[in-house]
Image (cartoon, helix red, strand yellow):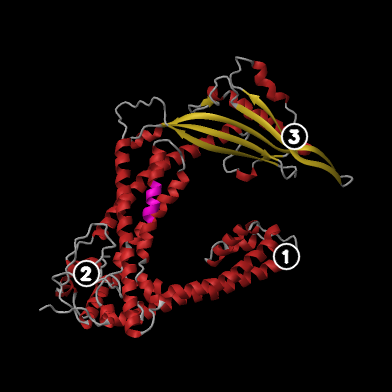
Amino acid sequence: MTTNCRPPERERLLSAVNSYGSQDGVHTLPSRPCLSSQEQEEELRRKLKYFFMSPCDKYRAKGRKPCKLLVQILKLMAVTAQLILFGLSNQMVVDFTEENTMTFKHLFLKDYVDGSGDSYAVYTRRDVYDSIFYTVKQYLALQNMTLGQYAYASDGDENSTALQLCQRFYKKGSINPANDTFNINPQVVTECVNVSPTSHINPGETLKYQNITLKFYKLISVSIMFKLKAINIQTIINHEIPDCYTFQILILFDNKAHSGRIKITLDNDVVINECSDPSVFGYANNDAGRLIFDIFVILLCVLSFFLCVRSIIRGVRLQHEFGKFFRLKHGKEVSCSTRMEFLNGWYILLIVSDIFTFLGTIMKIGIESKNFASYDVCSILLGTSTLLVWVGVIRYLSFFQKYNILIVTLRAAFPNVIRFCCCVAVIYMGYCFCGWIVLGPYHDKFRTLSMVSECLFSLINGDDMFVTFSHMRQKSALVWLFSQIYLYTFISLFIYMVLSLFIALITGSYEAVKHHGICGMHPIELREFIAECTDAPNSGKFREVESSVCSFFCCCDRMTTYGEDNLLVN
């Protein structure tokens, strides 16, 4: 005699099918007996408890290996090793570039002194001409005097111009301060003189630059542009084949302000190319080894990405199941905070780190193959991904109560801290705008909004207080008095009140966690529902429900019972 296992509507909605309310009854496993509503509720409780277990408890409950934990540890070591190798290589590039930039400043800037920075300028017409002629002469005599091995670079033609001397000026300009009159056509005109280092071909062409006439009354700027080539042989220290560098040098005489002071700056852009015929005795090219390691890192990131995405999808499915059960039993919707418990933010963080690592590794391969030289973007991607990977390890430490205090305290204090910071930001921005407009003309640290923000943030942390007070120019007694009131009120408000309240918020959350534990971290309805399950991880109750065969990346399997494949493995 066949037993009818179709329950009434309420029990059928509580049954362990793929979705509550399903009319599909053909998926029932032959070996699975019909469960009562109480038994199905206990299975859901057990399933939720398993979801929030630590990897160690899950191993004791189901015997499943913590695959994601092992993948994250392996990825942590691989990404860190990759970052260190890239950092060492990048550091040699930075050192070589900075040392050559300093060399160029001493070679091509007349009477340059280390540390001049923005103070390097000229003030007479004769000094402008002397500085220009000095730069061009040094360029022409470079190979006979420099200590480094440099070569002239051009656009491909051996006889083409390698240096370009240009002046930019207004099309028409007439300024008469005596009569307070001026007549200016703002259209900009550019005139250039080309200088070639191959003076033996046509010496007259090389000396054309000495006939240049600068129109100081309408001059905007004078620029000298040229390229030099060099080889960075210090990479041999790291058993790497040296790279060939092309330095694109720009020396700019800036007269936009027309203040009688022409600032001179030297900018050096670097293009890294693979040398045409590298040969280092006793060294072999290890590009293949680095490429294999980078591919290994990419595969690890892809694996980690799919594991985390699978867990997030399973968490969303479990959240829907619990929501439908809660709605059926209690007649109301699950709160938003309860739903967010099923969305693991750590997995999102790891997914972002995987994406950044993948993109950074692709760029690293391109840099090492000399296809492009975006060191800054690659450094940001690899550095951020490594930071996120290391931060993600805290998730596994948070399963132990003695190591969990940081995460629990930050999580408890986060809402109050955000609300507090929003209120403080309004006051802070008010001080920034006020300081910029009033003190900007009289204090170097208040010239721009970004500098004002940096200065005020330093004052909050007790840095450079006396220097900020003492550098205030006393040209205006009214402004000086305002500056004293401004600084004293800001320091008193933010250090003695705002900063103390901020610390009090964190301390209060810590004390609450310390005295009341972490039981309040989960929403009440979810915590109370799970608490009714008293089964220990090693009780064997979590092994009772069998699962269907599922592939490694499967996350959307359809089942009839709360089987093992419906459980989330964190």
Which quadrant of the view contains residue 433? Answer: bottom right
Task: Residue lying at the far bottom in this picture: please name it.
Answer: 330
Q: Could you say which disc has been placed on residue 26 in the image?
A: 2
Crowding at mark 1 (Cα within 10 Å: few <14, some 14-19, many 20+):
some
286 on left or right of 460: left
474 on left or right of 95: right
Q: Secondary structure at mark 3?
A: helix
Residue type for callout 3: Arg
- Residue under the image location 24 percent in, 74 percent down: 16
Out of 538 and 220, give the one closest to the viewer: 538
Label 3 – label 2 distance at C-alpha: 95 Å
Q: Looking at the image, tell me whether mark 3 or mark 1 is earlier in sequence order.
A: 3
Q: Secondary structure at mark 1?
A: helix
Crowding at mark 3 (Cα within 10 Å: few <14, some 14-19, many 20+):
few
Crowding at mark 2 (Cα within 10 Å: few <14, some 14-19, many 20+):
few
Q: Which residue is mark 3?
A: 125
- Residue under the image location 80 percent in, 37 percent down: 172
Residue 14 to residue 351: above or below: below
487 on left or right of 24: right
Q: Could you say which disc has been placed on residue 429 in the image?
A: none
Q: Which residue is mark 1?
A: 479
